[in-house]
Amino acid sequence: MCTTFWYQSNTHPKYKFVIAFNRDEIIARPYKSIHYWEANPSILAGLDLPTGGSWFGINITNGNIAFLTNCEFVPFSIITGGIELSRGYLISSFLHLKEKCTSASDFEPALKKVLLRKKLLNGFNLVYTNIDANSAYYINNYWEEDKIMELPGNKSYGMSNGVLTNDLYKAESNKHILVDILSANMSLEETKDCIFQVMLNEKLAPEDKVQPKMAPKESQYCLNESSIFVNYHKKPAVVGGFEAATLWTGLIIVENDNHMHFYERVYDHFKPTDKPITIHPILEKNGIKEKDLSKVGYKEVYLDKIISK
């Protein structure tokens, strides 16, 4: 599960970097929501307590950003051997770097280290970037070749649990949406609310598009995980029988003066929200209706910071 959309640009009149990330996870799995890490106060990220890694975060000193999703194309196996064999370590290790990475040569050493151990890890899609870079860099451990894909800026991307070039319908059909939102010249608050509405979209994929056409047999997608926002459900016993849902949304908006706005929502699937929802016209133009938005309750946290240039 998990779905993310991001945009970076060196030409947008207001924003240089925007990312929204839905974390879908086993409800019983303990984690710490967004915070400055005691071990390194430059890291602003969530923390997966069983492994000590993360799924999404930023180094607020140098602007490095890392995020990952599960790649269901790689058959899951029970892997033990310490934190270095957790996918979350791919995030924390990059965010601990003191060096600011903006060019391909800056990112290459960290990405090559990941490729060396990719077969020791469960399936992942991984992106490293920086708020001042105009490209992001993507790798996975599904491709046999050790390929690093450069993702040029001035456009938006979507990523879920396929691979970036053959992803799920929810990522493929909405990957353009941040460009539409950021072209509307809205206020920061309106922009933030509109992006959160995208991340609350619980509309399921058409049944014939639940899986990518080239999905291997090992892929374990099911219809109720085919929406951007995944409602509470119990997985079939054959894959563990655990309860899962979208538990968390993180949103980073960085203005051109390096003023970062970090929003976090933590959801309560057993308590509906008492806040009114009015769909934004841009989303209606993209086929998202008010009835498609989840009405789950949430707590929202806001942090802001000027990131060093």
Image: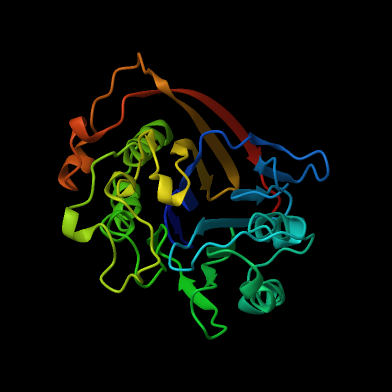
- Residue depicted at x 29% and y 66%: 212
Q: Which quadrant holds the C terminus?
A: bottom right
Residue 1 in view of the camera: no
Task: Please tell me whether residue 76 is drawn above or below residue 26 in the rendered image.
Answer: below
Residue furthest front in the image: 238
Task: Please tell me whether residue 232 is drawn above or below residue 213 in the rendered image.
Answer: above
Give the image location of residue 1, x and y in percent: 43, 51
Give the image location of residue 172, x and y in percent: 30, 61
Q: Quadrant of residue 163?
A: bottom left
Nearest the eye: 158 or 181: 158
Horizontal side of 215 relative to 83 (left or right) equals: left
Nearest the eye: 135 or 139: 139
Give the image location of residue 80, x and y in percent: 71, 59
- What's the image's color scheme? rainbow
Residue furthest bottom in the image: 145
Horizontal side of 197 relative to 133 (left or right) equals: left
Task: Please tell me whether residue 43 is drawn above or below residue 87 in the rendered image.
Answer: above
Residue furthest top in the image: 274
Residue 126 in view of the camera: yes
Horizontal side of 253 relative to 85 (left or right) equals: left
- Residue depicted at x 69% and y 78%: 116
Nearest the eye: 107 or 71: 71
- Residue depicted at x 31% and y 24%: 295
Residue furthest right in the image: 39
Give the image location of residue 97, x and y in percent: 77, 60
